[in-house]
Image (tube, rainbow, N blue to C red):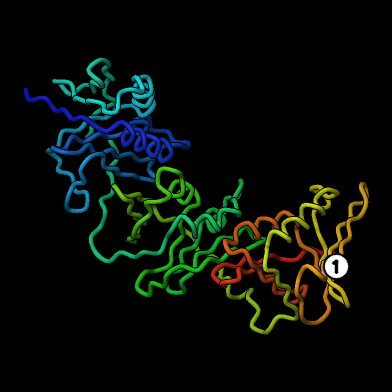
Protein backbone atom coordinates (compact mmCIF):
# COMPACT_ATOMS: atom_id res chain seq x y z
CA UNK A 1 0.00 0.00 0.00
CA UNK A 2 1.25 3.51 -0.82
CA UNK A 3 2.75 5.37 2.10
CA UNK A 4 1.57 8.92 2.87
CA UNK A 5 4.59 10.91 3.98
CA UNK A 6 5.66 14.51 4.31
CA UNK A 7 8.51 16.43 5.92
CA UNK A 8 7.48 19.67 7.67
CA UNK A 9 9.38 22.66 8.99
CA UNK A 10 9.55 22.34 12.76
CA UNK A 11 8.87 26.02 13.56
CA UNK A 12 5.86 26.13 11.24
CA UNK A 13 4.51 22.90 12.71
CA UNK A 14 4.94 24.09 16.31
CA UNK A 15 3.26 27.37 15.42
CA UNK A 16 0.20 25.62 14.00
CA UNK A 17 -0.01 23.30 17.00
CA UNK A 18 0.05 26.31 19.36
CA UNK A 19 -2.82 27.93 17.44
CA UNK A 20 -4.79 24.67 17.46
CA UNK A 21 -4.37 24.37 21.25
CA UNK A 22 -5.87 27.85 21.69
CA UNK A 23 -8.79 27.05 19.37
CA UNK A 24 -9.65 23.74 21.04
CA UNK A 25 -9.30 25.09 24.59
CA UNK A 26 -12.54 25.30 26.55
CA UNK A 27 -15.24 23.12 28.04
CA UNK A 28 -16.79 20.51 25.78
CA UNK A 29 -18.24 17.00 26.02
CA UNK A 30 -16.88 15.41 22.84
CA UNK A 31 -13.57 13.58 23.19
CA UNK A 32 -13.08 13.52 19.43
CA UNK A 33 -12.58 17.29 19.22
CA UNK A 34 -9.49 16.98 21.40
CA UNK A 35 -7.89 15.79 18.15
CA UNK A 36 -6.63 17.66 15.11
CA UNK A 37 -7.12 16.56 11.50
CA UNK A 38 -3.90 16.29 9.48
CA UNK A 39 -4.36 16.17 5.70
CA UNK A 40 -1.38 15.02 3.62
CA UNK A 41 -1.10 17.08 0.41
CA UNK A 42 1.64 16.66 -2.22
CA UNK A 43 3.62 19.71 -1.00
CA UNK A 44 1.93 20.71 2.23
CA UNK A 45 0.38 19.49 5.44
CA UNK A 46 -3.02 20.94 6.37
CA UNK A 47 -4.00 21.08 10.04
CA UNK A 48 -7.66 21.52 10.97
CA UNK A 49 -9.45 21.58 14.31
CA UNK A 50 -12.66 22.72 15.96
CA UNK A 51 -14.31 23.05 19.37
CA UNK A 52 -17.73 23.47 17.68
CA UNK A 53 -17.68 27.23 18.32
CA UNK A 54 -14.37 27.91 16.58
CA UNK A 55 -12.75 26.17 13.65
CA UNK A 56 -9.28 26.66 12.22
CA UNK A 57 -7.35 25.63 9.12
CA UNK A 58 -3.62 26.17 8.79
CA UNK A 59 -1.24 25.20 6.00
CA UNK A 60 2.34 24.08 6.61
CA UNK A 61 4.52 24.14 3.52
CA UNK A 62 3.48 25.47 0.12
CA UNK A 63 -0.02 27.06 0.16
CA UNK A 64 -2.79 24.99 -1.38
CA UNK A 65 -4.87 26.51 -4.17
CA UNK A 66 -8.55 27.28 -4.54
CA UNK A 67 -9.09 28.84 -1.13
CA UNK A 68 -8.20 25.82 0.97
CA UNK A 69 -10.57 23.27 -0.57
CA UNK A 70 -9.43 19.76 0.42
CA UNK A 71 -10.61 16.71 -1.47
CA UNK A 72 -12.32 13.99 0.50
CA UNK A 73 -9.83 11.60 -1.11
CA UNK A 74 -6.87 13.39 0.48
CA UNK A 75 -5.21 11.07 3.06
CA UNK A 76 -6.14 12.21 6.58
CA UNK A 77 -5.50 11.15 10.14
CA UNK A 78 -6.92 12.28 13.50
CA UNK A 79 -4.46 12.55 16.38
CA UNK A 80 -4.57 13.93 19.91
CA UNK A 81 -3.34 17.53 20.00
CA UNK A 82 -1.76 17.04 23.43
CA UNK A 83 0.07 13.84 22.49
CA UNK A 84 1.24 15.30 19.20
CA UNK A 85 2.52 18.46 20.90
CA UNK A 86 4.38 16.45 23.54
CA UNK A 87 6.05 14.22 20.97
CA UNK A 88 7.20 17.18 18.87
CA UNK A 89 8.59 18.91 21.98
CA UNK A 90 10.55 15.79 22.88
CA UNK A 91 12.44 15.79 19.57
CA UNK A 92 15.95 17.26 19.75
CA UNK A 93 16.04 21.00 19.13
CA UNK A 94 18.73 20.35 16.54
CA UNK A 95 16.03 18.93 14.25
CA UNK A 96 14.71 21.73 12.03
CA UNK A 97 12.49 19.40 10.01
CA UNK A 98 10.18 16.63 11.16
CA UNK A 99 9.07 13.70 8.97
CA UNK A 100 5.46 12.53 9.36
CA UNK A 101 3.83 9.39 7.98
CA UNK A 102 0.36 7.87 8.21
CA UNK A 103 0.84 4.26 9.27
CA UNK A 104 0.08 1.74 6.52
CA UNK A 105 -3.30 0.69 7.93
CA UNK A 106 -4.37 4.24 8.81
CA UNK A 107 -4.56 3.69 12.57
CA UNK A 108 -1.85 6.14 13.61
CA UNK A 109 0.78 8.73 12.81
CA UNK A 110 4.51 7.97 12.75
CA UNK A 111 6.57 10.99 13.84
CA UNK A 112 10.29 11.42 13.18
CA UNK A 113 10.53 7.74 12.28
CA UNK A 114 10.46 6.78 15.96
CA UNK A 115 7.11 7.39 17.65
CA UNK A 116 3.64 6.31 16.56
CA UNK A 117 0.56 8.02 18.00
CA UNK A 118 -2.61 5.95 17.77
CA UNK A 119 -5.32 7.64 15.68
CA UNK A 120 -7.96 9.47 17.70
CA UNK A 121 -10.88 8.12 15.71
CA UNK A 122 -12.37 7.98 12.24
CA UNK A 123 -12.38 11.12 10.12
CA UNK A 124 -16.03 10.46 9.20
CA UNK A 125 -16.95 10.83 12.89
CA UNK A 126 -15.26 14.22 13.20
CA UNK A 127 -17.56 17.31 13.19
CA UNK A 128 -18.08 18.91 9.78
CA UNK A 129 -15.59 21.72 9.28
CA UNK A 130 -16.89 24.91 7.60
CA UNK A 131 -15.34 25.84 4.26
CA UNK A 132 -14.14 29.34 3.49
CA UNK A 133 -16.96 30.84 1.37
CA UNK A 134 -16.44 32.42 -2.02
CA UNK A 135 -17.48 36.00 -2.61
CA UNK A 136 -16.82 39.45 -1.22
CA UNK A 137 -14.26 39.89 1.55
CA UNK A 138 -13.45 42.94 3.67
CA UNK A 139 -10.25 44.24 5.23
CA UNK A 140 -11.68 45.54 8.51
CA UNK A 141 -9.68 43.92 11.33
CA UNK A 142 -6.13 44.36 12.57
CA UNK A 143 -4.30 43.31 15.71
CA UNK A 144 -3.64 46.97 16.58
CA UNK A 145 -7.34 47.87 16.56
CA UNK A 146 -8.34 44.75 18.48
CA UNK A 147 -5.59 45.42 21.04
CA UNK A 148 -7.01 48.89 21.64
CA UNK A 149 -10.25 47.31 22.83
CA UNK A 150 -8.58 44.62 24.95
CA UNK A 151 -8.68 46.83 28.05
CA UNK A 152 -12.31 45.79 28.47
CA UNK A 153 -12.75 42.17 29.59
CA UNK A 154 -16.03 40.30 30.05
CA UNK A 155 -15.25 38.37 33.25
CA UNK A 156 -18.14 36.06 34.10
CA UNK A 157 -20.75 38.19 32.30
CA UNK A 158 -23.07 35.99 30.21
CA UNK A 159 -24.52 38.77 28.02
CA UNK A 160 -23.40 38.26 24.45
CA UNK A 161 -22.74 41.92 23.71
CA UNK A 162 -20.41 42.08 26.73
CA UNK A 163 -18.58 38.95 25.61
CA UNK A 164 -18.11 40.23 22.05
CA UNK A 165 -16.63 43.02 20.00
CA UNK A 166 -19.01 44.79 17.64
CA UNK A 167 -17.73 45.11 14.08
CA UNK A 168 -19.80 47.91 12.56
CA UNK A 169 -18.56 48.04 8.99
CA UNK A 170 -21.00 50.62 7.59
CA UNK A 171 -20.04 53.04 10.39
CA UNK A 172 -16.35 52.15 10.21
CA UNK A 173 -16.20 51.34 13.90
CA UNK A 174 -15.04 48.53 16.20
CA UNK A 175 -16.67 48.73 19.64
CA UNK A 176 -16.53 47.01 23.03
CA UNK A 177 -18.34 47.61 26.30
CA UNK A 178 -18.72 46.21 29.81
CA UNK A 179 -21.73 48.36 30.70
CA UNK A 180 -19.70 51.06 32.47
CA UNK A 181 -17.41 52.03 29.61
CA UNK A 182 -17.40 51.91 25.85
CA UNK A 183 -14.36 51.82 23.56
CA UNK A 184 -14.67 52.75 19.90
CA UNK A 185 -11.85 52.37 17.35
CA UNK A 186 -11.98 53.51 13.75
CA UNK A 187 -11.75 50.81 11.06
CA UNK A 188 -12.17 50.97 7.27
CA UNK A 189 -15.79 51.56 6.22
CA UNK A 190 -17.43 48.61 4.48
CA UNK A 191 -20.95 49.49 3.35
CA UNK A 192 -21.63 46.01 1.97
CA UNK A 193 -20.77 44.05 5.11
CA UNK A 194 -23.47 43.70 7.72
CA UNK A 195 -22.45 44.48 11.33
CA UNK A 196 -21.69 41.42 13.45
CA UNK A 197 -20.56 40.34 16.92
CA UNK A 198 -17.06 38.87 17.17
CA UNK A 199 -16.43 36.90 20.40
CA UNK A 200 -13.62 38.31 22.50
CA UNK A 201 -12.18 34.80 22.71
CA UNK A 202 -11.84 34.85 18.93
CA UNK A 203 -10.18 38.26 19.15
CA UNK A 204 -7.70 36.97 21.73
CA UNK A 205 -6.73 34.06 19.47
CA UNK A 206 -6.30 36.37 16.48
CA UNK A 207 -4.03 38.67 18.49
CA UNK A 208 -1.92 35.83 19.91
CA UNK A 209 1.79 35.92 18.99
CA UNK A 210 1.24 33.28 16.32
CA UNK A 211 -1.46 35.21 14.41
CA UNK A 212 -1.33 38.90 15.32
CA UNK A 213 0.65 39.87 12.21
CA UNK A 214 -1.39 37.70 9.86
CA UNK A 215 -4.99 38.93 10.27
CA UNK A 216 -6.46 39.21 6.78
CA UNK A 217 -9.81 39.71 5.10
CA UNK A 218 -13.15 38.91 6.73
CA UNK A 219 -16.05 37.08 5.11
CA UNK A 220 -19.53 36.86 6.63
CA UNK A 221 -22.34 34.33 6.09
CA UNK A 222 -25.63 33.95 7.93
CA UNK A 223 -24.01 31.59 10.44
CA UNK A 224 -20.28 32.27 10.47
CA UNK A 225 -17.54 34.87 10.40
CA UNK A 226 -14.36 33.82 8.58
CA UNK A 227 -11.05 35.61 9.18
CA UNK A 228 -8.27 34.78 6.75
CA UNK A 229 -4.70 34.49 7.98
CA UNK A 230 -1.44 34.38 6.09
CA UNK A 231 -1.66 30.60 5.88
CA UNK A 232 -5.30 29.62 6.41
CA UNK A 233 -8.39 30.93 8.17
CA UNK A 234 -10.28 31.06 11.44
CA UNK A 235 -14.03 30.48 11.53
CA UNK A 236 -16.39 31.33 14.39
CA UNK A 237 -20.11 30.77 14.74
CA UNK A 238 -21.84 34.14 14.94
CA UNK A 239 -23.33 34.73 18.42
CA UNK A 240 -26.97 35.56 18.83
CA UNK A 241 -28.01 38.88 20.29
CA UNK A 242 -27.48 42.51 19.43
CA UNK A 243 -25.01 45.16 20.47
CA UNK A 244 -26.59 48.18 22.22
CA UNK A 245 -27.28 51.27 20.14
CA UNK A 246 -24.34 53.19 21.56
CA UNK A 247 -25.18 56.28 19.52
CA UNK A 248 -27.99 56.90 22.00
CA UNK A 249 -25.52 57.68 24.77
CA UNK A 250 -23.38 59.91 22.56
CA UNK A 251 -24.07 63.59 23.33
CA UNK A 252 -25.36 65.54 20.35
CA UNK A 253 -24.15 68.92 21.61
CA UNK A 254 -20.79 70.58 22.21
CA UNK A 255 -18.86 69.59 25.37
CA UNK A 256 -18.94 71.91 28.36
CA UNK A 257 -15.20 71.50 28.87
CA UNK A 258 -12.15 70.09 27.08
CA UNK A 259 -8.94 68.97 28.81
CA UNK A 260 -5.90 68.25 26.63
CA UNK A 261 -2.37 66.98 27.08
CA UNK A 262 0.45 66.39 24.60
CA UNK A 263 1.56 63.41 26.69
CA UNK A 264 -1.00 60.94 28.06
CA UNK A 265 1.67 59.60 30.42
CA UNK A 266 1.05 62.64 32.61
CA UNK A 267 -2.52 61.43 33.18
CA UNK A 268 -1.33 57.88 33.87
CA UNK A 269 1.20 59.18 36.41
CA UNK A 270 -1.42 61.27 38.23
CA UNK A 271 -3.74 58.27 38.41
CA UNK A 272 -0.88 56.20 39.86
CA UNK A 273 -0.33 58.80 42.59
CA UNK A 274 -4.04 58.84 43.44
CA UNK A 275 -4.20 55.02 43.44
CA UNK A 276 -1.82 54.91 46.42
CA UNK A 277 -4.72 55.65 48.78
CA UNK A 278 -7.52 53.96 46.81
CA UNK A 279 -8.97 50.44 47.00
CA UNK A 280 -11.96 48.53 45.64
CA UNK A 281 -14.37 50.33 47.95
CA UNK A 282 -12.98 53.78 47.16
CA UNK A 283 -11.88 53.71 43.52
CA UNK A 284 -12.98 57.13 42.30
CA UNK A 285 -10.98 60.21 41.39
CA UNK A 286 -12.71 63.59 41.12
CA UNK A 287 -11.91 66.13 38.40
CA UNK A 288 -13.06 69.65 39.21
CA UNK A 289 -12.68 72.83 37.21
CA UNK A 290 -13.32 76.23 38.72
CA UNK A 291 -10.48 78.67 38.41
CA UNK A 292 -8.06 75.75 38.48
CA UNK A 293 -8.15 72.15 37.29
CA UNK A 294 -7.83 69.87 40.32
CA UNK A 295 -7.77 66.09 40.82
CA UNK A 296 -8.90 64.71 44.18
CA UNK A 297 -9.18 61.21 45.65
CA UNK A 298 -10.47 60.36 49.11
CA UNK A 299 -10.36 57.20 51.20
CA UNK A 300 -11.72 57.56 54.78
CA UNK A 301 -9.38 54.78 55.91
CA UNK A 302 -6.22 56.25 54.34
CA UNK A 303 -6.55 59.96 53.68
CA UNK A 304 -6.84 62.34 50.74
CA UNK A 305 -4.96 62.99 47.52
CA UNK A 306 -5.28 66.43 45.96
CA UNK A 307 -3.31 67.93 43.09
CA UNK A 308 -3.66 71.07 40.99
CA UNK A 309 -2.90 70.01 37.40
CA UNK A 310 -3.70 73.34 35.74
CA UNK A 311 -0.12 73.79 34.55
CA UNK A 312 0.12 70.24 33.18
CA UNK A 313 -3.03 70.25 31.04
CA UNK A 314 -4.66 72.83 28.81
CA UNK A 315 -8.32 73.26 29.66
CA UNK A 316 -11.20 75.30 28.39
CA UNK A 317 -14.90 75.56 29.18
CA UNK A 318 -17.34 75.89 32.03
CA UNK A 319 -16.75 74.66 35.58
CA UNK A 320 -17.63 71.06 36.46
CA UNK A 321 -17.06 68.34 39.05
CA UNK A 322 -17.10 64.68 38.01
CA UNK A 323 -15.73 61.42 39.43
CA UNK A 324 -14.39 58.43 37.46
CA UNK A 325 -12.96 55.02 38.23
CA UNK A 326 -9.19 55.48 38.46
CA UNK A 327 -8.36 52.11 36.87
CA UNK A 328 -10.72 52.78 33.95
CA UNK A 329 -8.90 56.03 33.19
CA UNK A 330 -5.54 54.23 33.15
CA UNK A 331 -6.89 51.51 30.85
CA UNK A 332 -8.32 54.14 28.51
CA UNK A 333 -5.04 56.04 28.34
CA UNK A 334 -3.05 52.88 27.67
CA UNK A 335 -5.42 51.95 24.84
CA UNK A 336 -4.68 55.24 23.07
CA UNK A 337 -1.83 54.69 20.63
CA UNK A 338 -1.10 58.41 20.16
CA UNK A 339 0.98 60.27 22.66
CA UNK A 340 -1.51 63.13 22.90
CA UNK A 341 -5.00 62.89 24.37
CA UNK A 342 -8.14 65.00 24.71
CA UNK A 343 -10.75 64.60 27.45
CA UNK A 344 -14.27 65.84 26.62
CA UNK A 345 -16.75 66.63 29.38
CA UNK A 346 -20.50 66.98 28.80
CA UNK A 347 -21.71 66.88 32.42
CA UNK A 348 -22.64 64.29 35.04
CA UNK A 349 -25.54 62.91 33.01
CA UNK A 350 -23.26 61.95 30.13
CA UNK A 351 -20.11 59.84 29.75
CA UNK A 352 -16.79 61.60 29.33
CA UNK A 353 -14.69 60.81 26.27
CA UNK A 354 -10.96 60.11 26.39
CA UNK A 355 -9.95 60.48 22.76
CA UNK A 356 -6.69 60.07 20.86
CA UNK A 357 -5.18 63.20 19.35
CA UNK A 358 -5.79 61.71 15.89
CA UNK A 359 -9.46 61.07 16.73
CA UNK A 360 -9.30 57.39 15.69
CA UNK A 361 -10.02 55.99 19.15
CA UNK A 362 -12.22 57.08 22.02
CA UNK A 363 -13.07 55.62 25.40
CA UNK A 364 -16.39 56.67 26.89
CA UNK A 365 -16.47 56.36 30.69
CA UNK A 366 -19.60 56.75 32.75
CA UNK A 367 -19.11 59.06 35.76
CA UNK A 368 -19.36 57.79 39.32
CA UNK A 369 -21.64 59.31 41.92
CA UNK A 370 -19.90 61.86 44.09
- Quick check: 148 above or below 3? below
Q: Position of residue 50 (x, y in %)?
A: 35, 40
Name the residue tied to disc 1.
294
Q: Quadrant of residue 107?
A: top left
Q: Nearer the viewer, residue 265 or 131?
A: 265
Q: Is residue 247 left or right of residue 47?
A: right
At numbered mark 1, what does the secondary structure look like: helix, strand or loop? strand
* Residue shown at the point (57%, 56%) measured from the top left: 162
Toward the bottom, the furthest residue is 253
Packing grade of label 1 (10 A; few <14, some 14-19, many >=20) is: some
- Quick check: 343 above or below 43? below
How many numbered badges does the structure rendering display? 1
* Residue shown at the point (21%, 36%) measured from the top left: 39
Q: Nearer the viewer, residue 225 or 229?
A: 229
Q: Position of residue 242 (x, y in %)?
A: 50, 64
Which quarter of the image is occupied by the C terminus?
A: bottom right
Q: Is residue 328 left or right of residue 89?
A: right
* Residue shown at the point (45%, 46%) measured from the top left: 205
Q: Position of residue 129 (x, y in %)?
A: 28, 44
* Residue shown at the point (34%, 25%) measured from the top left: 84
Q: Is residue 98 visible?
A: yes
Q: Is residue 224 visible?
A: no
Q: Is residue 4 left or right of residue 365?
A: left
Toward the left, the furthest residue is 1
Q: Quadrant of residue 2?
A: top left
Which quarter of the image is occupied by the N terminus?
A: top left
Amino acid sequence: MKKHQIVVNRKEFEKELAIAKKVIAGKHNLCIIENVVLSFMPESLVLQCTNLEHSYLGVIGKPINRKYRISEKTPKVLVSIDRLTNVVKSISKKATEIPLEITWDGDGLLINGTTTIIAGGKYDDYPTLPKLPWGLSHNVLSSEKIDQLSGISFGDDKREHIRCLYVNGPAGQLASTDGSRLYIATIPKTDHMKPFLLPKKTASILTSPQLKNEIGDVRITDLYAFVETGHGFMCVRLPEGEFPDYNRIMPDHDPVAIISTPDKQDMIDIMAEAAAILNQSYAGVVFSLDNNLVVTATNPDCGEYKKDISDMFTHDGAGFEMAFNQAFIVDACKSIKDRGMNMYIWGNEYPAAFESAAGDFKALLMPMRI
